[in-house]
Amino acid sequence: MKWLSLTAILLFLVACSASTPKTSLYVQIGGNIGAEKLVDAFIKQIGNDDVILPYFRESNVRHFREGFITHLCDTLDGPCDYEGDSMVQIHTGMAISESDFNRVVDLLINAMSEVGIAHSVQNQVLARLAPMRSEVIKL
Amino acid sequence: MKWASVFAVCLFVCGSTYAATGKLLATPGVSQVEGSAGGGIVPWAQLAGYASEDEWSASGFCSRASLKDYQLDVCGVQANLFDRVELSFARQNFDVDALNLDIEQDIVGAKVRLYGDIVYSKYPQLSFGIQHKSLDDATVANLLGAEDDSGTDYYLAASKLHLGAVGGYNWFWNITMRHSRANQLGLLGYGGANDSTPWQLEASSAVFLSRHWAVGAEYRQKSNNLGLGESDWKDIFVAWIPNKSVSVTAAWLDLGKIAGQTSQTGWYLSVTGYF
Ligand code: HEM
Ligand code: HEM
C-alpha cells in the first residue's frame, strides 16, 4: 500500500537520522558537568514557579540538588549509585496531583532546553523518568 | 460562516481566562471531523482538552475540508470532565458544488476513558465513545436509498505515546474499532440495500518532530451500504501546537469516491482553541 510504505519510509528516515550512539544517556546530557548544569537550571525553574515552589517550602536546596543529581546520574546509566530515600518515601505526604506532576515535567523540559540538550535526548530522559510517576504522585 | 466568527470571537475572549493545563503539551490530540478529540478523521482514546483528573476544560474547533467536488465545514465544542468523560457537539455542513446543495448534520458525542494514560500507563489508554448523528433534511439520503436519517456510532479506541521511541522522537499511534451504519459520515444517511458489515477499523500514527510539530497519517475504513462504491479514507497531516491554548492542523485528504464522484482529494485545515 502506497500510504503504508510512505509512513514506513518516514519512520525509517527519522530513525536513521538520529541513530543512537552506544554512549549512555548520562554522557549524552554532558556527564557530571552537564547534570549539574541541568539540575541548577531545573532548580531555577522551580524557584520561579508559584505552583511548584510551595512543595519545597521546607526543603534544603543543597540536599535536593545533590540528591537529584545522583538520582539522575543513576537513572541515566551514569557511574553513580543513588542511595537516598526511595521515591515513595520522599514524596509521601506531598499529595502531588497529576497536573502538578506534568507541570514539573514542563519545568524539566524548559531546563533541558535551556542548557541545550537535544530534543531526542530530552525525550529519552523523559522516557526513563516517566515510569516513576506512580511512585511520586498522589501519596 | 456564522459559526466560524462566533468561534473566533470566543477564542479571543476566552483564551486568556481560565484554562486547564494539567496534561503535557499536544497530548489531547486535535479535533476530528465528527467533533471528538482525535486526529482529522479518526477519534482517538484521548479526551479533548488539557484537563487532568481534578480539572475540567472546554474547547472548540472549526475545520474545513475542500475536495474536488465537495466542501465540508465543521464547527464544534467539547467539554472534558476530570479526564474521565468527554462531551461534544458538532455541526457539519456539506456543500455539493455541482448541485448547489447543502447537507447539514448534528453530532452529539460522548467518550469515557476506561483505562490508562497515553504517556504514563504501561498499556495504551483505552476509551469507549458514541456519536449520535442526525440529518437536518433526509431528501438526498432517501433519494440514494438510505434507510434512516439518523444513527449512532460507537467505538473503542486505544492510544499510546512512546517517549523517544523512534530515534529519540516521540511516536504516537491509535487504533479505533467502530460500529457504524453511516454512509459518508451519515451525510448520505444510514444503512441501505447493500448493508455490509457495520464494523470498521481506523488507525492513526504520528511522529513529533519537536514539542510543537507533529506529522502523521490516518486511515479510516468505510462501509458501502448504498452500493455506490464508498472508499476508505486516508490522510497525511501536520499539526502545530504552539501552546496549550491552540492547535492548528493541515492535511492532505484522499477520500476516494463520494456519491459517484471519483478521486475526491483535497486540503483540510482545522483550528482548535482550548479554554
Ligand atoms: C536557583 C534557583 C532559585 C532562586 C534564584 C531562588 C530565589 C529565591 C529568592 C529570591 C527568594 C526570596 C528570598 C527572600 O525573600 O528573602 C527565595 C526564597 C525561598 N526559596 Fe528560593 N530560589 C531558587 C530555588 C529554590 C528551590 C529549588 C527551593 C526549594 C528546594 C527554594 C526554596 C525557597 C524557600 C523555602 C524560600 C523561602 C525562604 C524564606 O522565606 O525563608 N528556592 N528563593
Ligand atoms: C519522576 C519524577 C520525580 C523524580 C525522579 C524525583 C526525584 C526526587 C529525588 C531524587 C529527590 C531527593 C533529593 C534529595 O536527596 O534530597 C526528590 C525530592 C523532592 N521532590 Fe521529587 N522527583 C520527582 C517528581 C517530583 C514532583 C512532581 C514534585 C512536586 C510537584 C517533587 C517534589 C519533591 C520535593 C518537594 C522534594 C524535596 C523533599 C525534601 O525536602 O526532603 N518531586 N525528588
Image (tube, rainbow, N blue to C red):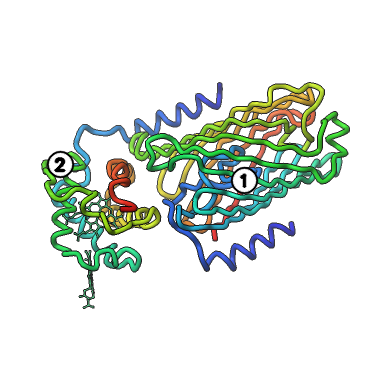
Is A87 situated left or right of B195 in this image?
Answer: left
Q: In front: mark 1 or mark 2? A: 1
Whether residue A122 is visible? no
At label 2, the amino acid type is Gly
Q: Position of residue B126 (x, y in %)?
A: 49, 37
Q: Along the line of sight, which residue is nearer the eye, A116 or B275?
A: B275
* In the depicted structure, whether residue B21 falls above or below residue B210: below
Left or right, residue A50 beside residue A91: right
The quadrant the N terminus of chain B occupies is bottom right
Residue A80 in view in this figure? yes
Residue at x 11%, y 43% (from the top left corner): A81
Residue A107 spot, x, y in % from top left: 32, 57
Give the residue at mark 2: A78
Give, as a three-letter code, the residue at label 1.
Ala
Q: Which residue is mark 1?
A: B110
Chain hosting mark 1? B
Specify few, some or many for label 2: CA neighbours under 10 Å numbering under 14, 14-19, or 20 or more: some
Where in the image, quadrant-wise, is ligand 2 located? bottom left
Separation (CA) of disc 1 from disc 2: 47 Å
Q: Secondary structure at mark 1?
A: strand
